[in-house]
């Protein structure tokens, strides 16, 4: 199979074609493609397009769910390969990441975890609908430098605040920083709850690196 183009990767997600997404993801893992670029310009561009089509009323729930499923399958193949390629590279820091309790949106969070991992962070991804206690327990267990929390619903944003409070109260031996994101989160909200903020996965890497320097 010739190396898939970014446009083909994007289209598989827009079409919600799970099988095609699987085949293309396997192909780029095997042919040595730059996986981070392929995720950003291919698969992630596809899911952003699906989001736009949904907002414009062109796509309905079945297409949305199907696009999300194709994205999940692709990332399930690409993510471990990114980690493997990183190999024994020294860790820039430990990040515990998840989507907060009550919130099932995990695509953006997974992208953030992927890019952090690809850029030298050790990432512990707890998935979605993660209770505050589970974040805190994992952060304590692995000695997290950063706890990163995603929320896509205005109704679940307050859980980011509860998490920031719980991490502060946990009394870890060193300062563990909170990093938040997700469509409704803003710099003002982050400031209010004492967290750092990044609006997308690329910025999350830069912000995490600057948190490690502080
Ligand atoms: C896909 C999707 C779904 C899928 C989720 C599939 C999945 N596995 O994630 C499904 C169909 C399941 C779904 C369900 C629902 N959804 Co929905 N969904 C979306 C949609 C269209 C796209 C989200 C997405 O994946 N975007 C692509 C990713 C790449 O972008 P992102 O998530 O924003 O992430 C980027 C940044 O925000 C940031 N980021 C994200 N997380 C983090 C974390 C950190 C630490 C950092 C630093 C950065 C960061 O970086 C990411 C990468 O660049 C959005 C609309 C939208 N445009 O956002 C609605 C949206 C979020 N959903 C919405 C709603 C209402 C729902 C439902 C309640 C619908 C319903 N009535 O059942 C349910 C909620 C279920 C639940 N309890 O969570 C609303 C939320 C409105 C609100 N203000 O609260 C939105 C905004 C749609 C709308 N306009 O009405 N949804």
Image (cartoon, helix red, strand yellow):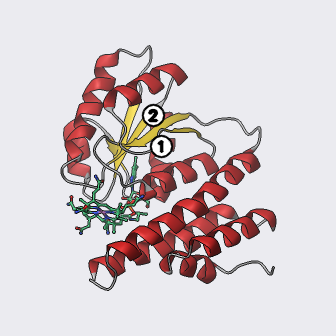
In this view, 109 is above or below 133: below
Tell me the residue at 75%/50% (across/down).
Answer: 85
Q: Which residue in the protein does label 2 denote? A: 146
Q: Position of residue 114 (x, y in %)?
A: 56, 52
Cα–Cα gap, marks 1 and 2 = 8 Å
Q: Which residue in the protein does label 1 denote? A: 208
Q: Position of residue 136 (x, y in %)?
A: 39, 25
Tell me the residue at 63%/53% (across/down).
Answer: 79
The quadrant where residue 152 appears:
bottom left
Q: Nearer the viewer, residue 69 or 193?
A: 69
In the picture, the quarter occupied by the N terminus is bottom right
Report the side of 63 relative to 183 (left or right): right
In this view, 28 is above or below 92: below
Q: Nearer the viewer, residue 117 or 128?
A: 128
Q: Position of residue 168 (x, y in %)?
A: 30, 23
Element type at mark 1? helix
Q: Position of residue 11 (x, y in %)?
A: 55, 82
In the picture, the quarter occupied by the C terminus is top left
Residues marked 1 and 2 touching at CB (< 8 Å): yes
The quadrant where residue 176 appears:
top left
Of the four image quadrants, the one with ligand 1 is bottom left
């Amino acid at each position: 199979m010739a190396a898939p183009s970014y446009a083909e990767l994007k289209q598989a997600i827009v079409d919600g074609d799970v099988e095609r997404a699987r085949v293309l993801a396997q192909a780029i893992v095997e042919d040595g493609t730059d996986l981070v670029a392929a995720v950003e310009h291919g698969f992630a561009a596809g899911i952003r397009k699906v989001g736009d089509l949904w907002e414009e009323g062109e796509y309905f729930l079945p297409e949305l769910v199907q696009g999300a499923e194709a994205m999940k399958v692709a990332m399930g193949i690409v993510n471990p390969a990114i980690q493997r390629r990183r190999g024994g590279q020294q860790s820039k820091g430990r990040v515990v990441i998840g989507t907060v309790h009550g919130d099932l949106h995990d695509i953006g969070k997974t992208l953030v975890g992927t890019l952090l991992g690809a850029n030298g962070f050790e990432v512990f991804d707890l998935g979605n609908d993660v209770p505050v206690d589970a974040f805190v327990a994992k952060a304590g267990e692995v000695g997290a430098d950063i706890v990163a929390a995603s929320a896509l619903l205005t109704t679940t944003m307050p859980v980011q605040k509860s998490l920031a409070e719980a991490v502060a109260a946990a009394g870890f031996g060193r300062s563990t920083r909170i990093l938040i994101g997700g469509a409704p989160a803003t710099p003002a909200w982050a400031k209010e709850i004492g967290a750092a903020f990044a609006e997308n996965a690329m910025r999350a890497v830069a912000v995490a690196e600057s948190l490690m320097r502080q």
